[in-house]
Structure formats: C-alpha cells, structure tokens
Image (cartoon, rainbow, N blue to C red):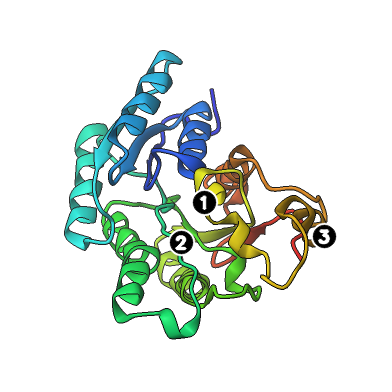
Amino acid sequence: MGKLSGKVALVTGAGRGIGKAVATRLAEDGAKVAINYRSSAADAEKLVAELRERGAEAVAFQADVSDPAQTGRLVDQTVSEFGTLDILVSNAGIEHFGPLESITPEDFDRVFSVNTRGQLFAVQQAARHLGAGGRIVLTSSVSATRSVFHHTLYAASKGAINSMVLNLAAELGQRGITINAIAPGGTVTDMADTHGISYKHPLLNASLSEWEKMHGALGRLARPEEIAAVTAFLVSDDASYITGRTIEADGGFF
C-alpha cells in the first residue's frame, strides 16, 4: 500500500516535464491520477498508457487552465471519473523573458492568465470538492525571490503565488485543507532547453554549465523526479502540519 492509496489527484500541465514526473510519482505512491494537458495530447495519452501498464489508474483530460470555465470542467471531469478529489497539483505554467520596454499588455495577460489567474481558479474549483485532509500544491519559482535579468514579468506572476498560498492557508485551514507551493530551481526539462541560457546574465562570460556550477550549491540542474519527490511529500500525511509555505527546491541556488 502506497502513502497515497485511495487518494485521487489532479495534476495540471502533466503531459511532460515536471508535471509528468509529479503525476508518475503520485501514481507510484498509490493515487489515482487525472493528467491535464493543453495541447500535448500524444504525450499525455502516452503517460496514461504507461501508468496503466504499471497497474495505476490514470486518465487524461484536455483543458486550458487560463480559462476558468475549462478549469471548472476539468475538475468536474476528474470527480466524475474517480468519484472524489483529494489532491490538486497546479503545475501548468509558461515562461517569459524580455526587457521592460518590450513587455506588452498582451504579454502580461498571457503570462498572468496561466501562471497566476489559472492557479487561483484551479484552487477555487478544486476546493469545491476537497474535504478535510485535502492537499493543494501550487507552482512558484525561485525567480520570485531571486533577481534574474529580463525576467520581471514571469517573476511577478510567480511571486503572486507565494502570497496566494500564504493567505489562502488560513481560509482553507478552517476546512482541514493544506495549501503550499513549490519553487523549483533550474530543472532538466524541454523548457530549460529553450530558456535555460536566458537565466545567465548576458555580461557573464561563462557557459551555461559553468554558470550552474557557480550559482548552485549542488552545481547542477534538478531532475524532474527530484521536484516530484518534494511535491509527493507535501501532498502526503507526513506534511499534515505544513501549510501556507513556499518550499524552495533549488539545489542551494544563490
């Protein structure tokens, strides 16, 4: 029996990257898992097939979490499929790099609609079904508390998550529900492949791998499974007295 046996988990943005690792870990721990994706249908269905082959119960649902109506439908589909909901892991997010003068209102709306508004309404919709012992984990970033060149818009969208969990903890705590956030550092994903180099200050004459060694105590990026392990802890009974906190899983980033 796994730590999460009998639990039902919804993981947004779970078709690939950290979300995929989280969904896999929760299934390994015994949870029934609803895997949300926006556009990577093939990846999500492949993950469902892999988990089912290993004896887990899993299903994939398409939804764009920037649309609260679609998020509500996603939660309802999960409950209809599995009969209940115990865990929400809000992982869906998008990156943005750009200097101040390049940021447009459209950029702001696009980033905040997913990274901030999308997570708030995911909590609102999930909370309709969560009971005592419910667990919510949102996704922040080390960028919320570290200065990164040309990363203002993204960092602001994630900084709001830290405030969100801090303030929602008291409200949800009255119902026996915990809410926390995880703030990953650099992680080996396709997003890191695309944007990793942008985290290095343009005036720093060093390769990306050299920069990683210079700015992290462990000198490397995280594996998605390492971020998933922290998430699995936060949704387990072992973390029953932790709420309103943002856990930095950043390899000692400085």
Residue at (32% x, 42% y) in the render: 36
- The picture places residue 250, in percent across and down from the top left corner, at 69, 56
How far apart are the alpha carbons under marks 2 and 3?
23 Å
- The picture places residue 21, in percent across and down from the top left corner, at 52, 37
Q: Which residue is mark 2?
A: 95
Q: Which residue is mark 3?
A: 214
Q: Which residue is mark 1?
A: 194
The one nearer the camera, 72 or 99, is: 99
The one nearer the camera, 181 or 50, is: 50
Q: Quadrant of residue 23?
A: top left
Return the disc, 3 or 1, that comes first in the chain's sequence: 1
Q: Quadrant of the C terminus?
A: bottom right
User: Which secondary structure, mark 3?
Assistant: helix
Residue at (32% x, 63% y) in the render: 118
Q: Quadrant of residue 212?
A: bottom right
User: Which secondary structure, mark 2?
Assistant: loop
* Residue 145 in the figure: left or right of residue 77: right
* Residue 185 in the figure: left or right of residue 86: right
Q: Nearer the viewer, mark 2 or mark 1?
A: 1
- The kind of residue tagged 1 is Thr
